[in-house]
């Protein structure tokens, strides 16, 4: 984040939107139009599970996406990150086994480790977490939690196939554990044909199955709202709400009121449509620059949505050395080992194309290619 904030650095590091893609005018108008009583609500404490009109608008949004809320509840959280932390508090006993896809989102790994989980990574292929390895480890370790990020995964960009999602959902039910489906990039597909593949795991099971879906406004409105949500079976969400009470009492009322207006006035769809084409263009530019500049030994993923490309160098390479060299030349990224529960994958690199304007992406990729070549 510090490097991303330095204007002289071309940052492929933070998974954050470019400032130009934030809906500043829409939010300014929403706040300017608030009457006195709405503003009073916005500056007050609110109920722990969330601002009721926002929960109602979100329920409508999720139902429209095909997610049934029968026997399920929602709580609003401070970003998806807090939802992960709450689930970790509720589920993780010290040294309890937990299965996660690998590579996996840094913030989830950090939270699970902070709560003392014993992490086992399940490698991925192009359809998602490998189901045979998941089944083996479910049977062997009997974990209480499994974590995955099935849409345009952070850091690999992989979109799980529907077939794999169904299989994972049925394994979770069979082995009686809880699945966390972390899904902040769900809306950000580049081509309409991929839309059906973004269906939630919640759509594969009934309302009693222990699948908890974590969503976020960070990538579709702005991370500064610090708002996300957690949907799952009533019996689990009730415990999560209790846990949240002692953490922060409630999420920001002010930003919840803004998010409610954003949804209620129908602004989300239009905004997200413009984000899809902006991120698709950035991804294309990065792919083009990688093809034009990378040495033959380097491979990378071709994401169909989201923010990230995962680059793999030959196994002897050390991404931290490449990082030090590239940062000197003013280009930053995140080294692969940060995304592995055991610090492996040091020959991989995560590139985020979300923050950097297209005209700087090419230059940054050329710096990176030069850095890699100098160590090959
Ligand atoms: C997979 C994943 N989950 C959760 C988060 C947390 O986001 P936030 O707390 O801003 O909603 C991120 C942010 O990058 C993410 O990539």
Image: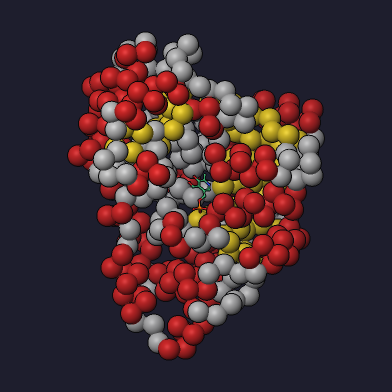
Foreground pick, 351 / 60: 351
Position of residue 274 measured from the top left corner of the image (x, y, whole percent): 29, 55
Front one among 246 and 108? 246
- Residue 49 visible to the viewer: no
Where residue 152 appears, as percent x and y from the top left, is 46, 40
The reply, left or right, for residue 278 in relation to residue 338 is: left
In x, y percent, where is residue 354?
A: 34, 44
| Residue 213 in picture, x, y percent from top left | 60, 52
Residue drawn at x 73%, y 28% as measured from the top left? 137
Q: Is residue 155 visible?
A: yes
- Tell me how the rendering is colored: secondary structure
User: Farthest residue toward the bottom?
Assistant: 36
Which quadrant of the structure image shows residue 223? bottom left
Is 70 displayed left or right of 224 in the figure? right
Query: Looking at the image, is 262 positioned above or below residue 10?
Result: below
Q: What residue appears at the point 53 percent right and 69 percent down from the top-left corner?
A: 252
Q: Quadrant of the N terminus?
A: top left
Q: Residue furthest front?
A: 328
Q: Is residue 10 above or below residue 288?
A: below
For residue 171, above or below residue 349: below
Q: Residue at x 35, y 56 (%)?
A: 272
Please state the total of marks drawn on the protein image: 0
Quadrant of the image for the C terminus? Answer: top left
Residue at 43% of width from left, 60% of height from top? 224
Query: Residue 331, located in which quarter of the rendered image?
Result: top left
- Viewer-proximal residue among 372 and 274: 372
Foreground residue among 230 and 372:
372
């Amino acid at each position: 984040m510090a490097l991303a904030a330095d204007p002289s650095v071309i940052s492929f590091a933070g998974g954050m939107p470019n400032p130009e893609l934030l809906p500043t005018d829409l939010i300014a108008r929403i706040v300017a139009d608030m009457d006195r009583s709405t503003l009073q609500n916005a500056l007050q404490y609110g109920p722990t599970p969330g601002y009721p009109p926002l929960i109602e608008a979100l329920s409508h949004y999720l139902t429209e996406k095909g997610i049934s809320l029968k026997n399920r509840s929602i709580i609003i959280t401070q970003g998806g990150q807090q939802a992960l932390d709450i689930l970790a508090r509720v589920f993780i006993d010290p040294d309890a086994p937990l299965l996660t896809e690998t590579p996996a989102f840094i913030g989830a790994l950090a939270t699970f480790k902070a709560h003392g989980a014993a992490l086992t990574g399940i490698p991925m292929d192009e359809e998602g977490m490998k189901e045979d390895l998941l089944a083996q480890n479910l049977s062997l370790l009997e974990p209480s939690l499994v974590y995955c990020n099935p849409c345009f995964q952070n850091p690999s960009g992989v979109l799980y196939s529907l077939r794999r999602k169904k299989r994972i959902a049925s394994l979770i039910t069979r082995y009686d554990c809880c699945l966390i489906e972390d899904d902040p990039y769900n809306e950000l597909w580049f081509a309409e044909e991929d839309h059906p593949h973004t269906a939630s795991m919640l759509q594969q099971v009934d309302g009693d199955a222990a699948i908890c879906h974590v969503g976020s406004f960070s990538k579709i409105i702005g991370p500064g709202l610090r708002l996300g949500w957690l949907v799952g079976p009533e019996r689990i969400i009730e415990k999560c709400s209790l846990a949240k009470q002692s953490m922060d009492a409630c999420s920001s009322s002010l930003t919840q009121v803004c998010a409610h207006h954003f949804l209620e006035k129908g602004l989300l769809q239009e905004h997200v449509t413009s984000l899809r084409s902006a991120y698709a263009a950035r991804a294309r530019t990065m792919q083009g620059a990688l093809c034009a500049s990378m040495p033959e030994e380097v491979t990378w993923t071709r994401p169909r949505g989201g923010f990230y490309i995962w680059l793999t160098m030959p196994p002897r390479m050390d991404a931290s050395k490449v990082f030090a060299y590239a940062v000197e030349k003013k280009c930053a990224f995140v080294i692969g080992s940060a995304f592995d529960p055991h610090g492996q994958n040091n020959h991989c690199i995560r590139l985020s194309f979300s923050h950097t304007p297209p005209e700087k992406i090419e230059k940054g990729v050329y710096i990176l290619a030069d850095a890699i070549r100098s160590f090959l």
